[in-house]
């Protein structure tokens, strides 16, 4: 038996994006997109000029940035422009459905066996590659070629859950047993265990088809310079490449002096690709040294957009100037900075104390301090996971903000009073365990540590900074201030399992020690023998797909915040971009958190 994969929830009626915190400025109504009126026709044509920061000076590391098998976080040139994948996204912000998987080269969402171990993708027939292989249709075998190529060259998203990948990686076999092209339009993937995020991985560069004839003989130099496009654009001049010639030169040199130019792919058919607008005719990419240089080009009008987020000071200036506000855009970066509390170390072995910590912290001040330290926008974080990992399901969820984001001392004192560490019942810890609590701080976050120390002092907890190894549980570090974690995909699957246990309590990133066994706690020298575990809940979410996955992780978030209380979230990172005045419509991609170049429209007069 098989089940049709996840439904795509409607974006209608979604809550608006939360406000972003600037240094000294609260900016309401963040928006990752803008567009002409729906009643107006799309603006097509023109040349879009993009400034992209080079990776490492004069010589670009092509395999790390331009080869889709390595650019698993997706260069801004991929999802939008050069390649299509089995599944993909619409290139819009979260509130416009941007985190939801949709069919791309697949004709529909995959069929998934009831045990979750077999995923069957059926391709749209007749979709062709760009020149010079424009007589070649995209076939199921091309995805096998692509995934095996990715495993041979580092496997950045770890495909080891596909049957046969460990053996293929070790060189014991010549093919991956779990990948089957049963005919030209059917790809079957067999998993060793259910994996709800497989669909998201099949929407990255790992799942961009590679025709074997383009890769043959180029294993050492890499596929990047010989990429055959499947998206609406192609490298200029690619049609002249002779892929049958083993000595053929790459289409671009990979150096700053050789900017990338994309032109329309004549094989691309809008009828088979409803996800991409592809409004401009041509895309010229200038490679620059740093974000400040890219922003300067946009401000001068010699570039239209940046590939990377703009520096904080520039975004702040644009957002604060009525004449420039329409040219600045912000969106969740999918990264949270937080304070994990060691649930085995006094006084944080008492959930009441952990709740008191969450109640007393001034999150507005914390987000501003993070912005200072990281030179980036930050939003107040009222719960654990960034909203783009939850499809905005918890956008207004704030369990510790009953009196606002400035902290609630009275409620914090009530929680402390109910703990085992307040013997006289005055709402302040009076036990020795609350004196000189050992806390680590991320370098550069010292001002944030000062804020946290002052807040905790209000409930009787004094802290002492340490330089101990935070990843060694034997050091008994009680909390870590300012640590951050970002994700590669718009799902919490590779986020919660690492940070919250999920059967992996020995993972270094699980700083709260959730799910640690009695044997581990004894080995590490703790006095407690039992700590909270959410392993079973995490394992269930790891297998969930689509809207069920978003809902499952949202429930985990609420569990972590209200019952387990393993963290004190401090701020959600926000990316900001600026555009030239030639740009009439802009969108940021919720998946890669980069500009969606295919969604950008230029003013006719430009």
Image: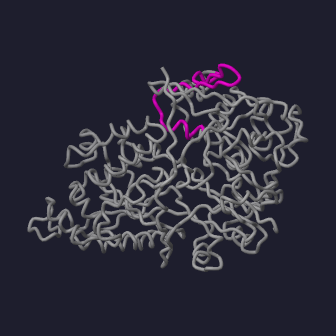
Q: Residue at x 36, y 43 (%)?
A: 501
User: Magenta stretch containing residue 528, yes or no?
Assistant: no
Residue at 80% across, 34% down: 214
Q: Residue 42, percent across and down?
A: 73, 57
**In the image, residue 44 above or below residue 359:** above
Q: Is residue 73 left or right of residue 23?
A: right
Q: In which image quadrant can residue 454 be found?
A: bottom left
Q: Give the camera-side residue of 472 and 270.
A: 270
Q: Is residue 600 left or right of residue 522?
A: right
Q: Is residue 341 above or below residue 518?
A: below
Occupied quadrant, residue 520: top left
401 relative to 388 in the view: left or right: left
Span colored in magenta: 174-202
Residue 382: where, in percent of width, then height? Answer: 38, 61
User: Residue 373 location in percent, x, y?
Assistant: 49, 70
Residue furthest front as drawn:
39
Task: Give the quarter of the figure containing the C terminus.
Answer: bottom right
* Number of numbered discs visible in the structure rendering: 0
Q: Is 416 placed above or below 115 here?
A: below
Q: Residue at point 30% right, 58% down? A: 478
- Indicate whether 161 appears above or below 492: above
Please name whichever residue, 191 or 345, is drawn nearer the observer in this view of the structure: 191
- Residue shown at the point (62%, 45%) measured from the top left: 72
Nearer-the-camera pick, 331 or 189: 331
């Amino acid at each position: 038996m098989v089940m049709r994969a996840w439904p795509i929830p409607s974006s209608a009626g979604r809550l608006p994006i939360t406000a972003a915190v600037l240094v000294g400025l609260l900016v309401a109504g963040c928006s990752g997109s803008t567009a002409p009126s729906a009643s107006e026709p799309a603006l097509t044509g023109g040349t879009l000029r993009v400034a992209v920061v080079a990776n490492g000076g004069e010589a670009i590391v092509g395999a790390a940035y331009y080869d889709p098998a390595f650019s698993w976080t997706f260069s801004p040139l991929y999802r939008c422009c050069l390649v299509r994948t089995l599944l993909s996204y619409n290139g819009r912000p979260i509130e416009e459905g941007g985190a939801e998987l949709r069919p791309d080269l697949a004709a529909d969402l995959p069929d998934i066996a009831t045990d979750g171990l077999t995923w069957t993708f059926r391709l749209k027939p007749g979709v062709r590659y760009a020149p010079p292989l424009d007589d070649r249709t995209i076939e199921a075998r091309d995805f096998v070629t692509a995934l095996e190529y990715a495993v041979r060259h580092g496997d950045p998203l770890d495909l080891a859950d596909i049957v046969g990948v460990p053996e293929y990686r070790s060189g014991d076999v010549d093919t991956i047993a779990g990948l089957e092209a049963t005919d030209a339009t059917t790809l079957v993937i067999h998993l060793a265990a259910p994996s709800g995020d497989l669909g998201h991985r099949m929407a990255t560069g790992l799942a961009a088809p590679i025709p074997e004839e383009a890769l043959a003989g180029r294993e050492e130099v890499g596929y990047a310079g010989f990429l055959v496009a499947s998206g609406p654009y192609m490298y200029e001049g690619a049609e002249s490449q002779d892929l049958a010639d083993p000595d053929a030169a790459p289409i671009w040199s990979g150096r700053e002096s050789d900017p990338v130019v994309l032109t329309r792919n004549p094989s691309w058919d809008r009828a088979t690709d409803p996800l991409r607008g592809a409004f401009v005719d041509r895309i010229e990419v200038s490679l620059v040294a740093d974000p400040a240089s890219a922003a300067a080009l946009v401000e001068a009008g010699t570039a239209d957009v940046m590939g990377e987020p703009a520096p904080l000071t520039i975004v702040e200036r644009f957002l604060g100037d009525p004449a420039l506000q329409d040219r600045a855009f912000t969106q969740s970066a999918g990264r949270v900075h937080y304070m994990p509390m060691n649930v085995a170390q006094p006084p944080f072995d008492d959930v009441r104390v952990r709740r008191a910590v969450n109640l007393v912290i001034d999150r507005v001040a914390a987000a501003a301090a993070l912005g200072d330290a990281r030179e980036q926008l930050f939003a107040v974080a009222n719960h654990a996971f960034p909203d783009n990992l939850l499809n905005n399901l918890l956008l207004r969820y704030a369990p510790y903000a009953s009196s606002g984001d400035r902290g609630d001392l009275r409620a914090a004192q009530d929680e402390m009073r109910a703990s085992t560490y307040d013997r006289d019942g005055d709402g302040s810890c009076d036990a020795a365990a609350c004196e000189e609590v050992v806390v680590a701080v991320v370098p550069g976050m010292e001002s944030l540590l000062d804020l946290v120390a002052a807040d905790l002092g209000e409930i009787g907890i004094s802290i002492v900074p340490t330089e101990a190894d935070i990843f060694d549980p034997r050091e008994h570090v009680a909390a870590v201030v300012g640590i951050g974690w970002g994700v590669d995909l718009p799902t919490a699957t590779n986020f919660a399992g690492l940070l919250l246990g999920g059967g992996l309590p020995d993972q270094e990133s699980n700083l709260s020690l959730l799910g640690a066994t009695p044997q581990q706690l004894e080995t590490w020298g703790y006095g407690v023998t039992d700590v909270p575990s959410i392993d079973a809940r995490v394992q269930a979410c790891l297998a969930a797909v689509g809207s069920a996955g978003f809902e499952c992780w949202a429930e985990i978030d609420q569990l972590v915040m209200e019952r387990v209380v393993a963290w004190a979230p401090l701020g959600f990172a926000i990316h900001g971009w600026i555009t030239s005045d030639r740009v009439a419509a802009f969108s940021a991609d919720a998946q890669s958190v980069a500009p969606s170049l295919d969604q950008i429209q230029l003013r006719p007069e430009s």
